[in-house]
Image (cartoon, helix red, strand yellow):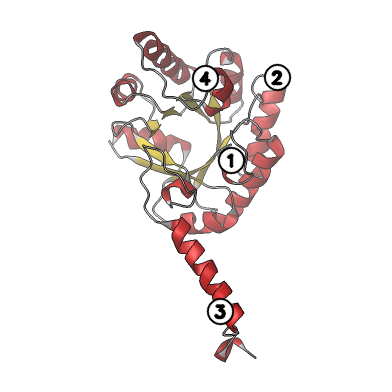
Amino acid sequence: MTTLDFHKFKSENRKISMVTCYDSTFAKIINDSDIDCILIGDSASMVMHGEKTTVPAKMEWMEEHTRSVRNGAPDKYIVADMPFLTTRKGLEHATDCAGRLLVAGANAVKIEGIFGQEEIIAHIVQSGIPVMAHLGLTPQFYNAFGGHKMQGKTEAAAEKIIEEAKLAEKLGCFAIVLECIPAELASKITKAVSVPTIGIGAGVECDGQVLVLQDMLGMTGFKMRFVRQYLNGLELIKGALNQYSADVHAGSFPAGDEIK
């Protein structure tokens, strides 16, 4: 898959499947799967580092996660998140950070929000770095939003997101993530722009969907309303660990061919 394929998929009415990933072990599994593309989200701050929000994500973390995922998934299209404030410290800093993520192995970067950083987004795109926009519930704005809350519920808020989506397309973004907005609004945006929309908690009418890998595999211990769990990973992994512990305590591991 290439950047151009995103537009092609939308024109052919073919849905795009995307999951997050942060390490080479899972990346190898995804590389051999039917998943279209990988997002190295700043959700790594919460999933991999135990933080409560994405705000603490560091540029160095994103580079290392990107490098690890690329090593494990050489054949997949990879988008890496620009962490908190990296696009708010000036043109040179933002361009440098975006470039570092591509050097680490990403094919594109994802930037939350449009307003206030139009010049930076346009410059990054014009520098040869593909940009995926992220609108609606933008987790880096956690403190401004007062938590992880659905966005675009009022007419004024909905119009603002529509305006941002159209501006993202105009600035050259090749795709738009729509997070936690009403399905009707997501459908309206999807029809209003020529670039594909990737939904998360935004209904089925988006051009594709993205989920946090550990959430869909049931490994996190909690379930958001919009997440479908395809595996009870928490219980399966815990069961395997408990069985290993029991075998060790009983002196039944190692045994047979496991002993040389």
**Residue drawn at the location 42% of the way across and 16% of the way down:** 161
The mark closer to the camera, 2 or 4, is 4
Which element carries disc 4, helix, strand or loop?
helix
Query: Which of pointers 3 and 1 indicates the residue nearer the eye?
Result: 3
- At 59% across and 33% down in the image, what residue appears? 54
Q: Nearer the viewer, mark 3 or mark 2?
A: 3
The image's mark for residue 46 is 1
Q: How far apart in space, not on screen, are marks 3 and 4 (Cα)?
A: 49 Å
Disc number for residue 89: 2
Could you tell me how far apart the alpha carbons at marks 2 and 1 are, in whole angstroms? 24 Å
Residue denoted by label 4:
145
Residue 256: tell me if it is visible: yes
Query: Horizontal placement of 217 versus 9: left or right?
Result: right
Q: Earlier in the sequence, mark 3 or mark 2?
A: 2
In the rendering, which numbered label is found on residue 247? 3
The 10 Å Cα crowd at callout 1, few under 14, some 14 to 19, many 20 or more, is some
Choose top left, top right, bottom left or bottom right for residue 201.
top left
What percent of the width, then of the height, locates residue 160? 42, 11
Which comes sooner in the sequence, label 3 or label 4? 4
Q: Relative to 113, say whether 102 is above or below.
A: below
Q: Quadrant of residue 182?
A: top left
